[in-house]
Amino acid sequence: MKLRTLASATAVALCLGQTAGAQEYNLSLAHWVPATHPLQVLGMEPWMQSITEESGGRITFTVYPAQQLGAAADHYDMARDGIADIAFINPGYQPGRFPILAAAELPFLFANATGAVRGLTEWYQQGGYDDMEMGDVYFCMALTHDPGTMHGKSPILVPEDVRGHTVRPANATEARFVNLLGGASVQVPAPAMREALSNGTADITQSPWQSLYIFGADTLVTHHLDMPFYAS
């Protein structure tokens, strides 16, 4: 998550109890998943509500879900340029732009999201990599989903089963992996997963199990690789 004005907003929150007539702030938060996605409902909304309550109502939020302010790949620039105060980004949608953070995209690296979030955030911040790669915004935290896998229209049992197929990879690192296996990668963001599968642009997709249902792709794939394959 990237926050262009987090430092000033935090300072305001800390000073609200000491300053009479403190200024009110309405912060825009942009992301690219549906408004019904657990990321917003179970994560962002309780977080925003807690800040509003702790600030006595002086800090509020307006949420722009589902790419309302820009394409999924543009959300980092939206935070940098002030189009949104806060933006949730997927670095994997911008190949080559964040090569250090991309290390987290390597297959078989994380067992679960809880450990991945803590370990990745601490490593990225304590190493100073956030300033190196994202110095023009305020890096808040890294976020990964639970390990995802491959879902397709035909059996996926061995690496050779990817050869000759078109695959929607989760990120740029996975795209290179797919290409090494002899598949053709078709990079579209998760919200376009269903369309890519339904119109034949892709016949295999990478995603966590939950995302198949969230983005409406569960009825379009019949075979699944049931193993923790990658994180993004």
Image (cartoon, helix red, strand yellow):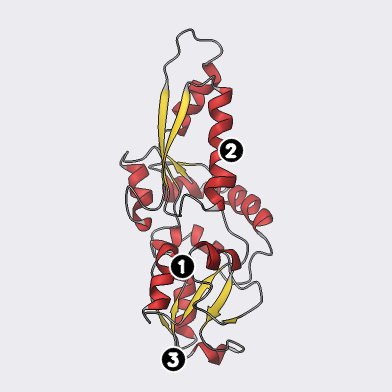
Q: Amino acid at mark 2?
A: Pro
Residue that badge 2 annotates: 46
Residue that badge 3 annotates: 164
Task: Out of 11 and 43, give the one closest to the viewer.
Answer: 43
The disc placed on residue 171 is: 1
Q: Give coordinates of residue 45: x percent, y percent.
A: 54, 40
Q: Amino acid at mark 3?
A: Gly
- Categorize mark 2 by other alpha carbons within 10 Å: few (<14), some (14-19), many (20+): few
Q: Helix or strand or loop: what does disc 1 sit on? A: loop
Q: Residue at x 50, y 57 (%)?
A: 101
The CA distance from mark 1 to mark 3 is 19 Å
Q: Are marks 1 and 3 in contact (CB under 8 Å)?
A: no
**Vertical comparison of 52 with 146: above or below:** above
Is 4 on the left-hand or right-hand side of 228? left
**Vertical comparison of 44 with 100: above or below:** above
The CA distance from mark 2 to mark 3 is 44 Å
Pick whichever of labels 2 and 3 is earlier in the sequence: 2
Query: How many numbered marks appear?
Result: 3
Instruction: Single out the mark in the foreground, 2 or 1.
Output: 2
Pick whichever of labels 2 and 1 is earlier in the sequence: 2
Q: Residue at x 43, y 71 (%)?
A: 194
State the image quarter where residue 155 is shown.
Answer: bottom right
Is 140 on the left-hand or right-hand side of 63? right
